[in-house]
Amino acid sequence: MNVINKFINRLNLLFMQSKFGLPNLFIFIYYHFKQFNVPLVYKVTNTSFTDSDKIVTFGSLCAIASTDDKIFKKFRLSRVLIQALDHVSIEQGYGYLQEIIKVEPWNSDFQHALKQIDSLGSPIKYKFKGYGFFSPTSLRYLKVHLDLTYLFHSLNELDIVEIGVGFGGQAMLTNILSHPNSYSLYDIPPVLDLSQKFIKESKVRGNFIYYSGIIPEKLKSDLVISNYAFSELNREIQDLYLKNVILNSKRGYITWNYISEYYYDGYSLADLLRIIPGSQIITEKPLTSPSNAIVVWGHDSVLSHPSI
């Protein structure tokens, strides 16, 4: 029965891809066979969903890719990274694209930023008709960036903090399209190692500062962001971030999911709204899970946002 279910699931995936044209169907099939596994050589503490026993090799990948150039050149094709971070579908990519052009007309700066991010790590790139070939994950970074600039206006000269940084894609895109005073990244050490290498290899200019997320130290900032990361931490680590980072920020943007509340005794969405003064919910668009939402504070443009 499991074999039959897997076969049916694969047929459904192929059907979904075919809806976006034959080139994208061929791309999907090609990259399906290009994906690879990373050996388990590095364990990390069980503080979040992406480094739990379910996919503990995410830490392994980050540790290896940050020191092994052969792995770094293709790390975005590793199955563990796709499962943990780079799993945005082409359908969701089109959704992000539609939200992007609602806010600002497509331009060469967007094209350049996406091309620069996608030049590293061999990501899966699909054809978005009329726009180009991009990773859907990179389109999500661009959509988040435009949300930030609409809600909080210019990001120039701001001290920005990101909690849970993946491989550094959001940090990189923000510093390509804006000029923050500083950009601080919090995560576990092997993830920071990979993001530091990714940003360094990109040759993007910026004042990047790296902080361990195991016991996050106190930091004041103008803007704190977190996309599907703070809501995947256990309550103990959430408390540290709230006390030392989030409540010390004038503005905030947190994409929220249910992982921590369901699996790690973490805070609920209602709890977060109660804890952060002046915070409110806006809809995640495109909605990637029925229970997802975005929590913002320190803004003045929510009601007129064309995407809301």
Image (tube, grey):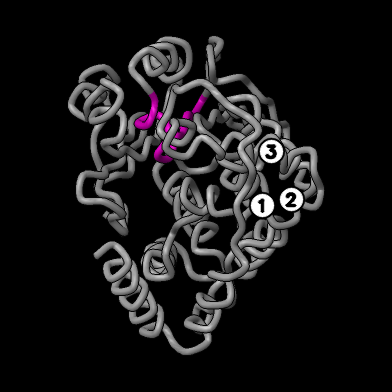
Query: What amino acid type is highlighted by mark number 3?
Result: Leu
Q: Residue at the location (33% across, 35% down)?
A: 296
Query: What amino acid type is highlighted by mark number 1?
Result: Phe
Residue 9 or 279: which is nearer the viewer?
Answer: 9
Q: Earlier in the sequence, mark 2 or mark 3?
A: 2
Report x, y in % for residue 294. 31, 41
Query: What amino acid type is highlighted by mark number 2?
Result: Ile
Q: Are marks 1 and 3 in contact (CB under 8 Å)?
A: yes
Q: Where residue 71 is drawn, which disc sits there?
A: 2
Q: Where residue 194 is drawn, which disc sits there?
A: 3
Q: Residue at the location (37% across, 31% down)?
A: 232
Mark 3 crowd level (few <14, some 14–19, many ≥20, 10 Å Cα) = many
Q: Which residues are magenta?
A: 222-233
Dot 1 corresponds to which residue? 75
Q: Is residue 76 at all visible to an observer of this figure?
A: yes
Disc 3 element: helix
Disc 2 element: helix
Q: Are marks 1 and 2 in contact (CB under 8 Å)?
A: yes
Q: Residue furthest bottom?
A: 22
Q: Is residue 244 left or right of residue 5?
A: right
Report x, y in % for residue 201. 80, 47
